[in-house]
Amino acid sequence: MTPFSPRFSAADAQVLERDVVYHGFFSLVKLSLKHRLFGGGWSQPLTREIFERGDAVAVLPWDPIRDELIFVEQFRPGALRDQDSPWMLELVAGMVADGESDSEVARREAQEEADCSLDQLELIATFYPSAGACSEQIRTFVGRVLTAGIGEVHGHAEEHEDLLVHAIPRVEALRMLDANEINNGHTLIALQWLARHGEALREQWLSN
């Protein structure tokens, strides 16, 4: 089987005009662009609005000895439409600052959000959560836990963070996944990966 490769490359899309409509903590950019068509030739100029928030790193802290996963619970304004609750159980995550490596972000955010120290990191996936409207790329990792502030509240008050730290057995987290009780994308992706690769990684970590 021939591996998939996109028909076109980055050179087959052209930005004709770029206008920053709003710039705050996040930015909204209005683009005029065109791209090649599968049937041949180029599209007519298109107008698209793109939400720019920078890239992020997310990490699933895992204690392989106790076989427990560390999550944070926090309020999310985008989920106010949810009739049950706008509080979500999530991975530790944060934005990537200029000059920061992904591993630095993962360890910093784990410490700040969950008082969690990690000694190993494994890449799970690199993905665009909503490429039709947002330029953000997320790099997701699983990290081996040394210590964690289970049951504690963490986060930067000046950033209005209010994070409750949970430790959940891996088997229970996977049950929640199967029961559609995990409702945010990066946590879903991490748990799906763990369901496929967790046993092999746990054996590797425990053998070390």
Image: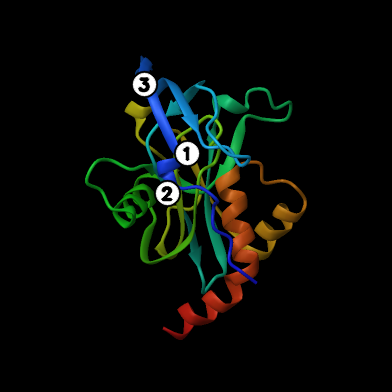
Give the answer, above or below, for where 124 lies relative to 137. Answer: below
- State which quarter of the image contains the C terminus: bottom left
- Identify the image's colour scheme: rainbow, by chain, secondary structure or one colour: rainbow
Q: Secondary structure at mark 2?
A: helix
The residue positioned 54% from the left and 31% from the top of the image is 75
Q: Nearer the viewer, residue 14 or 183?
A: 14
Q: Quadrant of residue 116?
A: bottom left
Badge 2 amino acid: Ala
Q: Is residue 164 left or right of residue 88?
A: left
Please give the residue where the numbered disc 1 appears in the rendered image.
Answer: 163
Which one is closest to the eye, mark 3 or mark 2? 3
Badge 3 amino acid: Arg
Please give the residue where the numbered disc 3 appears in the rendered image.
Answer: 18
> Measured from the top left, where is residue 178 in percent x and y?
75, 55
Q: Is residue 161 left or right of residue 90?
A: left
Q: Secondary structure at mark 1?
A: strand
Q: Which mark is residue 86?
A: none
Give the spatial CA distance, label 1 vs label 2: 8 Å
Q: Extreme top residue here? A: 21
Give the spatial CA distance, label 1 vs label 3: 37 Å
> Measured from the top left, where is residue 102 in percent x and y?
33, 53
Q: Extreme right residue here? A: 179
Which one is closest to the eye, mark 1 or mark 3? 3
